[in-house]
Image (cartoon, rainbow, N blue to C red):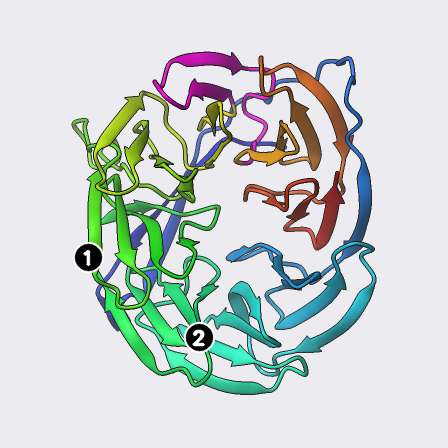
């Protein structure tokens, strides 16, 4: 049964970042799916089985026309992105994976359950490994010859992708309670900048090469009487449109900032750990209850809200062509018109238990379910 779930992590000092996880859940009756007029075809191009990833955060990685999908058992499959044909598969022997995969130049980067980052080749041979301060909270990011990791204790570390040499690290002491990320949080922009959400409702921008802080801004400030009420974290991936960086915070708000200096452009009250998407007209946000919002990209004015998918464990949105794609926890894909939020397409993908945003490549979107299914939509 679908549930609307709040998950928090209490970070202890054991092993300098070993996390103690607990979950509390409040169940809501999911909104039944009403019939819609399917004016835009939402096609399931192909689907295939991939390793199951019931623990940790896994999304398919795209590199030069090949998708890499990993799972907890150490298996990684390489698929042709156009056809879904399996090009190769390998196992990282003796390893249980907790996050991944990043892919580039014939190398694959994964995190294991012992708090290590591993670089492997297409046969599964470990090329190098580095001990981290905690297990990975999300897949690594590969950019400009660096592989950047985000550990569960909040530490960011960049390694040389060739030999694993540590290049820089950044860390801010986390609060005692943090929201568990259900989508990647780091975003590399070109070869120069890394943008990431951090605990306490903040957005941080770093020089990718040196790790030097460029600016930091507050998306939402903690408020409330109890410790749980004051949990306000940015745990979904910020987005960049060439002028603005936008992010949304759990129990907080969505905000857009000037990309150069970090000055606030606008902010509106809506809470989310699921994520947002941008186009030239609007910022689209999946609220924590599954409602989908659109805000004017220039002013933040509310353009529309769609409540038809509330409490269906809705993913963060991505752009699919000119429209908006979200997934629900039962594996249904939903297409919304960007101009008014109408549901205009729907199909079942077979990728169930999906909370992470799909990976969008413009005219196609890839989604990896926790049940070991990977689907491609166009």
The answer to whether 204 is drawn above or below residue 333 in the figure is: below
Residue 194 location (% of width, % of height): 35, 55
Which of the pair 346/239 is nearer the observer?
239
The answer to whether 258 is drawn above or below residue 113 in the figure is: above
Q: Does dot 1 land on a helix, a strand or a loop?
A: loop
Picture disc at residue 48? none
**Residue 146: quarter of image:** bottom left
Most common SS among magenta residues: loop
Tell me the residue at 59%/16% (across/down): 341
The numbered mark, 2 or 1, whose residue comes first in the sequence reads: 2
Residue 236 location (% of width, % of height): 42, 43
Would you say 179 lies left or right of 283 here? Answer: left
The answer to whether 23 is drawn above or below residue 342 in the figure is: below
**Mark 1 nearby-residue class (10 Å; few <14, some 14–19, many ≥20):** few
Which of the pair 166/139 is nearer the observer?
166
Picture disc at residue 117? 2
**Mark 2 nearby-residue class (10 Å; few <14, some 14–19, many ≥20):** many
Residue 304 in magenta stretch? yes
Tell me the residue at 70%/77% (across/down): 90
Residue 35 location (% of width, % of height): 76, 13
Q: Is residue 175 visible?
A: no
Residue 53 location (% of width, % of height): 61, 58
Q: Which residue is mark 1?
A: 172
Image quadrant where one finds the C terminus: top right
Residue range (magenta): 291-315
The answer to whether 233 is drawn above or below residue 208 in the figure is: above
Question: How far separated are the C-alphas under marks 2 and 1?
Answer: 20 Å
């Amino acid at each position: 049964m679908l549930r609307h779930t709040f998950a928090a992590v209490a970070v202890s000092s054991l092993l300098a970042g070993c996390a103690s996880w607990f979950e509390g859940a409040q169940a809501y009756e999911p909104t039944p799916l009403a019939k819609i007029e399917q004016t835009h075809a939402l096609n399931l191009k192909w689907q295939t089985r991939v390793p199951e990833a019931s623990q940790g955060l896994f999304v398919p990685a795209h590199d030069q026309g090949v998708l890499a999908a990993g799972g907890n058992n150490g298996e990684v499959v390489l698929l042709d992105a156009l056809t879904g044909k399996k090009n190769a598969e390998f196992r990282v022997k003796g390893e249980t994976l907790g996050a991944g995969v990043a892919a580039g130049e014939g190398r694959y980067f994964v995190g294991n359950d012992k708090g290590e980052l591993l670089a492997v080749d297409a046969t599964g041979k470990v090329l190098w490994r580095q001990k981290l301060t905690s297990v990975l909270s999300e897949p690594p990011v590969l950019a400009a010859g660096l592989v950047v990791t985000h550990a569960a204790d909040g530490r960011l570390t960049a390694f040389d992708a060739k030999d694993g040499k540590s290049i820089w690290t950044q860390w801010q002491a986390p609060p005692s309670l943090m929201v568990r990320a259900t989508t990647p949080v780091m975003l590399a922009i070109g070869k120069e900048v890394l943008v990431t959400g951090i605990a306490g409702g903040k957005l941080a921008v770093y020089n990718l090469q040196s790790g030097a802080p460029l600016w930091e801004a507050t998306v939402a400030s903690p408020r409330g009487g109890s410790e749980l009420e004051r949990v306000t974290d940015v745990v979904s991936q910020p987005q960049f449109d060439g002028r603005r960086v936008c992010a949304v915070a759990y129990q907080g708000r969505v905000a857009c900032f000037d990309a150069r200096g970090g000055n606030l452009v606008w902010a509106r009250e809506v809470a989310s750990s699921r994520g947002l998407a941008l186009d030239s007209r609007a910022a689209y946000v999946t609220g924590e209850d599954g409602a989908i919002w659109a805000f004017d990209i220039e002013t933040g004015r509310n353009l529309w809200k769609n409540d038809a998918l509330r409490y269906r464990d809705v993913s963060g949105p991505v752009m699919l062509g000119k429209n908006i794609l979200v997934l629900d926890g039962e594996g249904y894909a939903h297409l919304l018109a960007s101009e008014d939020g109408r549901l205009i397409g729907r199909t079942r993908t077979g990728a169930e238990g999906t909370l992470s945003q799909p990976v969008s490549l413009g005219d196609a979107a890839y989604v990896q379910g926790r049940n070991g299914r990977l689907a491609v939509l166009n």
